[in-house]
Image: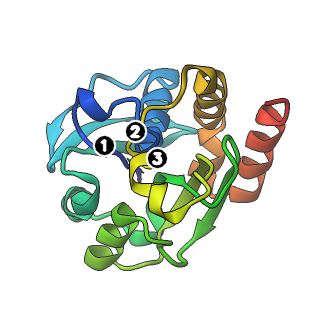
Amino acid sequence: MLLFVGLGNPGKTYAKNRHNIGFMAIEAIAQAHRFPPARSRFQGLVTEGTIGGERVILIQPKTFMNESGRAVAEAAKFYKIALADIVVFHDELDLPAGKLRIKLGGGNAGHNGLRSITALLGNEYRRVRMGIGHPGDKALVHSYVLSDFAKSEGPWVKQLCDAIASNADLLVKGDDASFQNRIHLATENE
């Protein structure tokens, strides 16, 4: 069993923010793999289903970003999911928009959602880093991540999330290199 976590902030106000691309990826996975509607559990929205023959729990914490770890820790404890079986989807300022990298552990790069999860569970979980680009000035980062994607960015955001959903079975199998390569091939024209 795996736990796929999408990071973002709850509520309609934040729904289209750059910081919420993790939520967008989880929603694409749920739709593509026909998961049932999510319900409130563990301080988050939770649904479960099967991907690649494995049971997968999807969670979108309803806490704000800096408290995401509370929801993830509750779900992981309830389902007895090992840290190595947690995959976190999040926005990444240090990657160009539309690019994706996956890694195990590592630093939190100032990401409050990752910091919260690491503080409560440890650091050795998998991270799907979804590039949103950088505003160019550190002073602009806060307003940048909390701003909506521009309408012109919609196609690459959808393409990236759809590619993640289409290839989620590779994440389930632990074939991170093939997953990353497939996403690159699916999004290279953007």
Q: Residue visible at 29% across and 69% down?
A: 116
**Mark 2 in CB contact with mark 1 (< 8 angstroms):** yes
Give the numbered dot on residue 60: 1
Q: Badge 2 is on which residue?
A: 23
From the top left corner, tell me how far across and down residue 174 is, in percent. Answer: 63, 58
In the rendered structure, which disc, 3 or 1, sits on the residue that comes first in sequence?
Answer: 1
From the top left corner, tell me how far across and down residue 90 is, in percent. Answer: 48, 52
Q: CA distance from mark 2 to mark 1?
A: 6 Å
Q: Amino acid at mark 1?
A: Gln
Q: Residue visible at 47% across and 41% down?
A: 18
From the top left corner, tell me how far across and down residue 28 is, in percent. Answer: 49, 28
Q: Amino acid at mark 2?
A: Phe
Taking depth in this image into account, of 9 and 117 the one nearest to the observer is 9
Number of marks in the rendered image = 3
Q: Badge 3 is on which residue?
A: 144
Kindly report which numbered mark, 3 or 1, lies closer to the viewer in this rendering. 3
Q: Answer whether residue 76 is visible to the viewer in this image.
A: no
From the top left corner, tell me how far across and down residue 118 is, in percent. Answer: 35, 75
In the rendered structure, which disc, 2 or 1, sits on the residue that comes first in sequence?
Answer: 2
**Label 3 SS:** helix
Q: Residue visible at 39% across and 55% down?
A: 142
Give the numbered dot on residue 15: none
